Each structure stands twice: as structure tokens, then as C-alpha cells.
Image: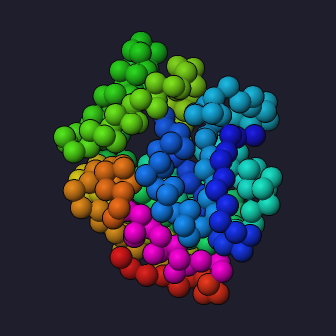
Amino acid sequence: MLHYRTYRLSETDPWVVFVHGAGGSSSIWFLQVKEFRKHFNILMVDLRGHGKSKGMPVSQKRKYSFEDITLDIIEVLDFLKIDRAHFIGVSLGTILIRQISELAPERICSMVMAGAIIRLNVRARFLVGLGNTFKRFVPYMWLYSFFAWIIMPRARHKKSRLLFVNEAKKVAQKEFMRWFKLTYELNPLLKYFEEKDTRIPTLYLSGEEDYMFLPAVEYIVQRHDNSFLGIIRNSGHVCNVDQPKDFNAKAIAFMQSNSASSGFIGASVAV
């Protein structure tokens, strides 16, 4: 099972599940824990091959697909007997949360999507193609560092860029290759997610400088019911690290307005 960490406030308070992106770990949320644990029970997981889940034996029945990796998370929920929770993810973690909404929608109170990947623009598709071409010939950290710089290019993105690169160094080359193969699934999966509206209360939190992914987020919010957009100023793709105070305030307010304990699941608040 995935390595996980919990912070329990009380038996009656709602749960929040944090899902990091590819190449990261649960440590990406270190600027959120202090504030969130004042209001919620917290579950943080390290995805397979990442953080303290590195070296986790993977069942032969499970391959590396978005669905299988999502089932890893659901397995932890089942083990801890968490029936419903709020979910918060960053970057590729938002795709996994969206996959949970397909496999087990009844388990989601609300979704907060940070730096959500909704669609791959021309530049993103070029980067994916470049990576697939050179992944067997170029050290994976060269590729990862290059991608991080393209996605988070500004000086004020340096902190989040270095955090992701340093975490990626802990991922083995073989593991990186397995995850990179998931890019072949991305386009059809994202197209499906774009067409299907879950109607689950969803807050997209995007940095105003997340130029690669923000336009698609703005588009999807206009198309899907019960979806809202919060712009994080002076921030890039990893907005929870760039501007944690603003990010935390918006996310917590949204989750509280859609909390299972409040008795009005489905009510939403624009931010």
C-alpha cells in the first residue's frame, strides 16, 4: 500500500486528501498542513515510486495507468475507512482526482485543483513529444529540469521549480520512465474529462502566470456546472508554493462551504 500520513482533528471533522504531481511527493504540501489541520482531518499520500512509497512492491495485476494509480489512493481510503473526503491536487495530481470522480464519485465532497492540467496546448504537446523522443538517450533529470523551467520560467517561480526538481531527483530512472509512458494516455483522457461534466463542486486555483495551462482552465469553468476559478496573483503553475497564504484561504473557504458535516453538500462559493 502507498505510504501515507494522517493528521486527525476529530472523529467528526471532514477529511481532506492531498495528491501531489508526478516527480513530487507529499512534501509539496508543507505550506498547507499547518492551516488545513486547524479545520480538517488530513490524509497525505506518496504516489507509487515517489517519496516514501519508493520501492513499494506493485501487484502484477496493476499496471501503470491513470486508473491503476488512482486505485492505489482508493485502497488507502478503504484501509482508513474514509468514506468521503475533499480532494486537493496539484498538476498531474488533478488528473488522478478527476479519475477518482469517475471511479468513485460518491466519495468526493469537493475537488480543489491547483495548476490543473485540462488540455495540452501546442507547446505542451511539443514537450511531451520531445520527451518521448529523447527519454532513452538523455538523463531523465535533464528532461525534468528542462520541463520545470519551461512550465515555471520566472524568477519568482524559482522556489517551486527547485522543490519539484529536488523531489524528482529521488525518483529512480526506471520509475520515471514508467510514469512518462502515461503521457500516451493523456490526450484521450483529457478530452473525455473535458466533455463529461461531473457536477461535483470544483474549485480551480491557478496562478495568473500559469500560461501553459490557465487558458484551458478558464474554458472548462465556463462549460462545467458547479465549477469555479480562483486566480492566484504573482504565481505560476505550483501556486500552492508560490503564494501559500492566498491559496490556503481560498481552498479552505471552498471546502468548508462544501463540507459533509455542514449538511449542504453541493453548495458552492465563487472566489
Determine if the magenta segment contains residue 222. Answer: no
Q: Residue 239 placed where, x, y %?
A: 34, 54
Which quadrant would residue 233 be assigned to in this image? bottom left
- Residue 130 on image: x %, y %: 35, 27
Q: Quadrant of the N terminus?
A: top right
Magenta stretch: helix, strand or loop mostly: helix
Q: Which residues are magenta?
A: 247-261
Would residue 214 be found to the left or right of residue 86 on screen? left
Q: Residue drawn at (67%, 61%), measured in percent from left and top? A: 8
Residue at horizontal 27 percent and vertical 34 percent from the top:
149
Can the viewer see residue 150 in this picture? yes
Q: Report if residue 250 lies within the magenta region.
A: yes
Q: x and y percent of residue 25 in the render?
A: 53, 39
Figure check: 34 above or below 144: below
Dividing the image into 4 quarters, which one contains the C terminus? bottom left
What residue lies at 58% left-to-right and 33% top-to-bottom? 50
Report if residue 118 is visible in the image: no
Instruction: Reply above or below: 269 against 186.
Output: below
Residue at position x 47%, y 48% from top? Answer: 30
